[in-house]
Image (spheres, grey):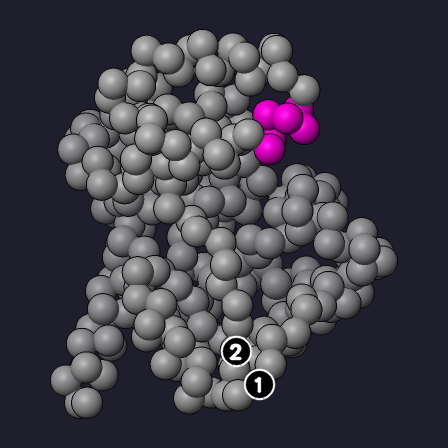
Amino acid sequence: MARATAISYAPLAKDLGISEAEAEVAVEKGMDVPKLGMIHPAHLPLWLLKERFPASWRILRDAQSFALVRAVRPRFLSAVMQRLREFRDTGPIRSDDPVVREEAARVCEWLATQARPVALEYVHFIPQSHFIDMDGRRIVNAIFPTDRMDAVADWLDEAGLHIEITHDHARRQPKPWARPIQPIARFAGRYLMPHAIKRALHPIWARSGAFADAAGGYAQVDLGSDVEDFIASYYASDQKMFEESLAGIDRKSASE
């Protein structure tokens, strides 16, 4: 099995005409690109890679690659929650908070005008298919559901590859009984704590008994019929791709 190696920022640095150290910072924080505005180099759809990032595109095109895909509705809700935290400074909130429904409607209004979204504040709403297929052709070698890392591990073994996955992406939200203390915690985080302390305490606070995994409550969240219809239509290709990933695992299991 091949050993894991450090991420190389050389192709991206070459595309941007900057140093590898600067490219690493750009991946973490985003950057301003002429005619595109603020984008996030860690979330570049395939069409953009091919058009504006040729060195990075060649690496991906020639590589053994896989993608993790997620059911459309929970992915959209998770993206709304992340947008509220990153760009609306809401702090931890529950998925059934009215502000989530309001923000979901605003996001859908913006997406309705975008055939190929790439703006920094909306990167988590880019259709998953834009990272996997292009011009009707599958670019990524394999796709897997996000909750089947065992299947990914098997595929990596067969390909002679090894990747360390250490980050837990499960979104956390306050339990119902903890909702009254959220305004106090938010005020303390915004106005009383230095940023470094707030950043250090946040993961500890999110893993405390006051929080639970958010995805478990997504099915009960009412987004309204207009938003639900838009999600189903705009991400139809993504949902089909997710179902394809499940079917692929079922076929492999049946053959073993």
Q: Is residue 210 visible?
A: yes
Residue topped by disc 2? 162
Q: Give the quarter of the image for residue 79.
A: top left
Residue type pointed to by label 2: His
The answer to the question of whether label 1 and label 2 lie on touching residues, with beta carbons closer than 8 A, is yes
Q: Determine crowd level at label 1: few under 14, some 14-19, many 20+ residues with C-alpha closer than 10 A.
A: few
Q: Position of residue 204 (x, y in %)?
A: 48, 34
Q: Give the quarter of the image for residue 175.
A: top left
- Please give left or right for residue 146 compared with residue 253 in the image: right
Q: Which residues are magenta?
A: 195-200
Image point (39%, 81%), residue name: 155
Question: Camera-side residue: 240 or 202?
Answer: 202
- Please give left or right for residue 125 compared with residue 147 in the image: right
Is residue 49 on the magenta stretch? no
Q: Is residue 44 above or below residue 35?
A: below
Residue topped by disc 1? 2
Residue type pointed to by label 1: Ala
Q: Magenta region, mostly helix, strand or loop?
A: helix
Q: Is residue 102 visible?
A: no
Question: Camera-side residue: 99 or 225?
Answer: 99
- Can you tell which mark lies on residue 170? none
Sequence-first disc among 1 and 2:
1
- Please give left or right for residue 20 compared with residue 116 in the image: right
- Please give left or right for residue 222 compared with residue 205 in the image: left
Q: Is residue 98 above or below residue 210?
A: above
